[in-house]
Amino acid sequence: MTQHHVIADIDLGKLSKNVETLKQQVNGAALMAVVKANAYGHGLIQSAQAAKRGGADWLATALLSESIELRDAGVSGPILCWLNTPDDEFAQCVAKDIDLGVNSVETLNSISAAAKTVGKTARVHVKVDTGLGRNGVTLNDLPDLISALKSAQNQGNVNVVGVMSHFAYADEPSNSTIGEQISNFKIAVDALTDANFELAVKHLSNSAATLGLPHTYYNLVRPGVAIYGISPGPEVGEAPQHGLQPVMRLRAPIVLLKRVPAGTGVSYAHQYHTTTETTLALIPAGYADGIPRSASNKGPIQISGKRFKVAGRVCMDQFVVDIGDTEAKLGDYAVLFGDPADGEPGLNEWAQAADTINYEIVTRIGPRVHRNYLNG
Ligand SMILES: *Cc1c(COP(=O)(O)O)cnc(C)c1O
């Protein structure tokens, strides 16, 4: 075996295709591919490049370090980074032409100071809280931020190029907060326009809105999870209904097979006992790799084309599968999730087994897992 036991096959061709498919559905709006959190576990640089090959006009990250990593890898074109704090070191970002989300006067001051040091104008997108109640400036605090933006722009330190906000309930297309957030967004857009800022981009649509709320596209959409072929939620529909294909497939080899009698306790605290004489397969993947421990006794596994479940506890580095009398040999791969269209367990089944959402499973796939890039 190689050093890495667990393999995530990442089909970059499918990622490009998903971006292409989404772009065809957004009535001419530009597309910003969200590649935060190591591209939702898929690998930052390779995924960003694949998204661009598929026609992504922009890239976006949460953290400055992620945007800088993109630039340092030679990725060109517009990049936005939005989870910014007053303590962040913005100088490098301004120097590397990374657009910045601004959510407060304090963050703006820090960005302005950095721009001054670098001798460049920082491009900023005003991040407004239109009702999510998380990041972003409230409509109440917006006038103060606008005054500060005006003076920073007059001094040549910043250029306000965009406005953005984020939905609380985009995955429930008929939720009443959606309309309220759209009206609040309009109030923010009008206030910024009245202050004479030329807003080149206005963006509000995450994946769920991109797939289900065409009236929220403005001139730029900002999907993350959908570009990886993952549905943002059941009400929005399954990924294949939107022509999207899962990009990641997670597999690990069988490293030990043993025949055991009925009544054998399996893994820590014997949360599983064999009911007959049977074969146990050891899979070297555990919660340190991002396999949720909460999926103990539940997580679906495919071996030799047949469906099983994790037997007993998921441990730090390994778990066991009771494969009965199924034929399998050492080195055969157990598939945790892949493409349900090919009969493999789906990511959503794992999310359900672990009582979480599909986003959490992929973003937690850890650094010990080898990303095997295909069709790059
Ligand atoms: C993560 C994030 C997105 C992308 O969300 P998805 O649901 O993955 O499409 C878009 N905008 C903001 C502000 C985010 O934090």
Image: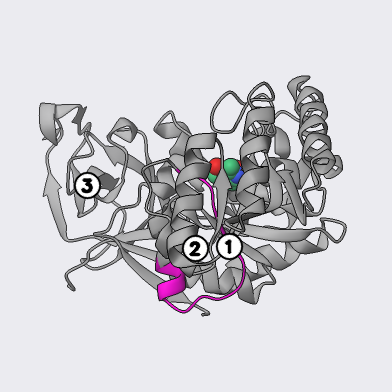
Q: Residue 107 at what x, y percent from top left? A: 48, 41
Q: Which residue is mark 2?
A: 94
Q: Which residue is mark 1?
A: 121
Foreground residue among 346 and 10: 10
Going from the N terminus, do you reach mark 2 or mark 1 first? 2
Whole-angstrom CA distance, mark 2 to mark 1, is: 7 Å
Q: Which residue is mark 3?
A: 288
**Amino acid type assigned to the residue bearing label 1 in the image:** Thr
Chain part drawn in magenta: 69-84
Q: Nearer the viewer, mark 2 or mark 1?
A: 1
Foreground residue among 297 and 87: 87
Whole-angstrom CA distance, mark 3 to mark 1, is: 43 Å
Q: Residues within 10 Å of mark 2 (few under 14, many from 20)?
A: many
Q: Residue 161 at what x, y percent from top left? A: 70, 55
Q: Residue 330 at what x, y percent from top left? A: 20, 66
Q: Residue 273 at what x, y percent from top left? A: 18, 30
Above or below residue 56? Residue 128 is above
> Does residue 109 show up?
yes
Q: Is there a contact, CB below 8 Å, between mark 2 and mark 1?
A: yes
**Amino acid type assigned to the residue bearing label 3 in the image:** Ala
Foreground residue among 206 and 17: 206
90 left or right of 270 in image: right
Residue drawn at (71%, 60%), measured in percent from left and top?
A: 31
Residue drawn at (69%, 67%), measured in percent from left and top?
A: 57
Quadrant (top left/top right/bottom left/bottom right) for the N terminus: bottom left
> Does residue 166 show up?
no
Q: Is mark 1 within 8 Å of ligand 1?
A: no
Q: Is mark 3 within 8 Å of ligand 1?
A: no
Q: Secondary structure at mark 1?
A: loop
**Amino acid type assigned to the residue bearing label 2 in the image:** Val
Q: Secondary structure at mark 3?
A: helix
